[in-house]
Image (cartoon, rainbow, N blue to C red):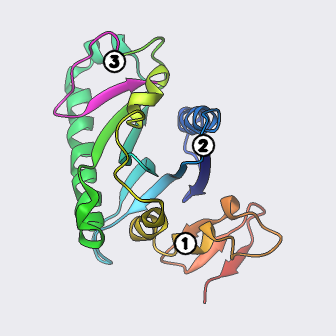
Amino acid sequence: MRVEHLPCGAFVNASEELAFTHVRDKLQGELGDERFLVLTNVSHSVGASAPADEIDMVVLGPTGVQVIEVKHWDRNYLRRNKWRVEEEADKLERKTRKVATRLRAKYPDLGRVDGKMLLTRQAGSLRAQGEEPVRGIRLFALEDWRPLLDLGRPHRLPDDRLDVLAEVIVPRAQIALRGELSPDIPHYLGLHYPTLGKIVTAAGSYLKIL
């Protein structure tokens, strides 16, 4: 499978980078020509004056859209910190609802958009152990990457809609996806800051978006 990475900000910690690398490598190791877009460290807002939500990862692919919160937790943490887990699940549910509302305005046939937590410290599968959802948010370990992305389920999102929906989540995302930043700079190096109207390169210099 093909994976295109659009980093919208730098990884905040090693857990976020591990989560992305794991998902990317697993998808690329699968047979098939299906395409997935992975947006990381997204700053998403429903309006210019609205506060932005920070989202660790959004995966768009033929099986739909997954809004993913990455946590360096395991099953023991869940048991010891139930209040914190519920609080974070509620926050993720609100973020997911905002993303889904904007995407459906552009593509009414999108279907369900799920918020999910990916726990990078968990050894072994959470799905196989029957871990129950928290406040409607399902929990996954790295080993659960296939159900995390709904692989194996019927395709419901055409490939030609992926770039369109990515642009809804992150304005001007298509500029990076099409590699129009510079012939010498791969698209995955572009970090977009909408308020600045600029692309930050890996070297820290700016490319102005006209």
Query: Which of the two labelled residues, at mark 1 and mark 2, occupies the earlier sequence position?
Result: 2
Q: Which residue is mark 1?
A: 174
Q: Is residue 129 magenta?
A: yes
Residue at image location 61% in from the left, 77% down from the top:
198
> In this view of the protein, can residue 124 be seen by the observer?
yes
Query: Which of the two labelled residues, at mark 1 and mark 3, occupies the earlier sequence position?
Result: 3
In terms of secondary structure, where does tag 2 sit? loop
Q: Which residue is mark 2?
A: 1
Dot 2 crowding, Cα within 10 Å, few <14, some 14–19, many 20+: some
Residue at image location 54% in from the left, 79% down from the top:
196
In terms of secondary structure, where does tag 1 sit? helix
Dot 3 crowding, Cα within 10 Å, few <14, some 14–19, many 20+: some
**Image quadrant in which the C terminus is located:** bottom right
Where on the picture, by quarter, is residue 136? top left
Amino acid carrying mark 1 in the image: Gln
Give the spatial CA distance, label 1 vs label 2.
20 Å
Q: Position of residue 187 (x, y in %)?
A: 68, 64
Dot 1 crowding, Cα within 10 Å, few <14, some 14–19, many 20+: some
Q: Position of residue 180 (x, y in %)?
A: 68, 76
